[in-house]
Amino acid sequence: MGVHRCRKCTAQSVINMPQHRLALCGEHFVEWVEKSTLEFIEKHRMFEPGERVLVAVSGGKDSLSLWRILSKLGYAADGLYIDLGIDDGCGYSKRSGDYVRKFAQTLPAGARLHVVDLSVAYGKAVPEMAGRRAGGKKRLCSVCGLVKRHEMNRAARELGYPVIATGHNLDDEAAVLLGNTLRWEVEYLVRQAPVLPAGDPGLVKRAKPLARFYERETAAYAIVSDIAYIEDECPFSKGATSLRLKETLNSMESGSPGTKLHFYYSFLRARKKGLFPGVERSELQTCEKCGEATGIPGLCAFCRLTVE
Ligand code: SF4
Ligand SMILES: [Zn+2]
Ligand SMILES: [Zn+2]
């Protein structure tokens, strides 16, 4: 924000992006984000015009911006909100859901919002599924991640969407990449990509159309576009490893603009050339109860959590 002038029209800029050597005014920034998203979708063959896309929305800036952008670009994008049942005294999930429902009304008629309330569908939400056993927040977040992946895929399959889009931004992707690199998690590394093709058995294609934008760019897009979103983070995100990784990357970025972008893009290029040949995903099976893909025979990890 500040003294820079828009490169396109010389009006005062709303954002300066040193990593792109680009400053833009509100109007031209919105135009740039939408055009860049379209190019990224086409480059990675995420989805075609007319194909139905299920956007996983959390009520935060990234996912709501993504839904707005896809809708403006003319894609048939519907939303999916999973009510995780996170309260912790601040009503986090309930408030997030309210933002999503209000936002959905700002989209052109025809855009649909699907809601899965875990407490209604399974009789318990994420905190109860994670239990009060040892592991604390870490276990809660790993259960939460598993539940979100399971429910996104199940909903897309049952509702007939060929692709799921999530709002992950470059800061998210670079932090995951750094974490996996620090532990050399090669099986995760080979599967980290802006688009994951559909797979057997019943894995729906997944795409991250905003993976090329810095978090401050998606935040600026939401603000300039008047998108009302939940600004609070999930109460359980405090102290999470992913936040520490993001802080590390941000301090490197401030000394050397473009660090995050180069880290991620160089990785994508190496991956394309066949980084870690011979690393393959373990054979997947079908869960006996829900029919979702699982690495273990019998019940999938989600069904194990929800049966008792
Ligand atoms: S921080 Fe909150 S929303 Fe994120 S994985 Fe953990 S519990 Fe789920
Ligand atoms: Zn301008
Ligand atoms: Zn299952």
Image (cartoon, rainbow, N blue to C red):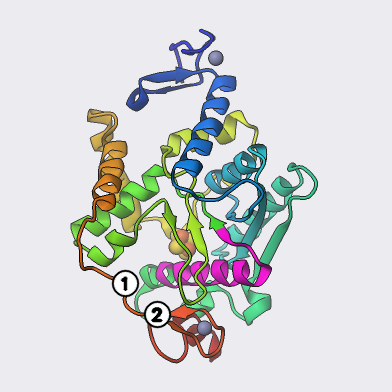
In the rendered structure, the answer to whether residue 116 lies left or right of residue 34 reads right
Q: Amino acid at mark 1?
A: Arg
Asked if the stretch drawn in magenta spans residue 153, the answer is yes
Image spot of residue 197 (x, y percent): 45, 61
Between 164 and 93, the residue placed more toward the observer is 164
Asked if the stretch drawn in magenta spans residue 222, the answer is no
Q: Secondary structure at mark 1?
A: loop
Count of picture labels: 2
Image spot of residue 181 (x, y percent): 21, 56
Between 19 and 47, the residue placed more toward the observer is 47
In the rendered structure, the answer to whether residue 99 lies left or right of residue 187 reads right
Q: Amino acid at mark 2?
A: Leu
Residue shown at the point (60%, 70%) measured from the top left:
157
**Image: magenta residue range:** 141-163
Image spot of residue 284 (x, y percent): 40, 80
Relative to residue 189, is residue 261 depicted above or below? Answer: above
Q: Secondary structure at mark 2?
A: loop
Tell me the residue that label 1 is attached to: 281
- Extreme-right residue of the structure: 109
Per the picture, the main secondary structure of the magenta-coloured stretch is helix
- Alpha carbons under labels 1 and 2: distance apart: 8 Å
Residue shown at the point (64%, 60%) measured from the top left:
80
Residue 131 visible within the image: no
Q: Quadrant of residue 188?
A: bottom left
Between 4 and 28, the residue placed more toward the observer is 28
Tell me the residue that label 2 is attached to: 284
Residue shown at the point (61%, 66%) measured from the top left:
156
* Figure quarter occupied by ligand 2: top right
Q: Are marks 1 and 2 in contact (CB under 8 Å)?
A: yes
Q: Quadrant of residue 118?
A: bottom right
Relative to residue 21, is residue 241 depicted above or below? Answer: below
Q: Does label 2 point to a residue whose CB lies under 8 Å from ligand 3?
A: no
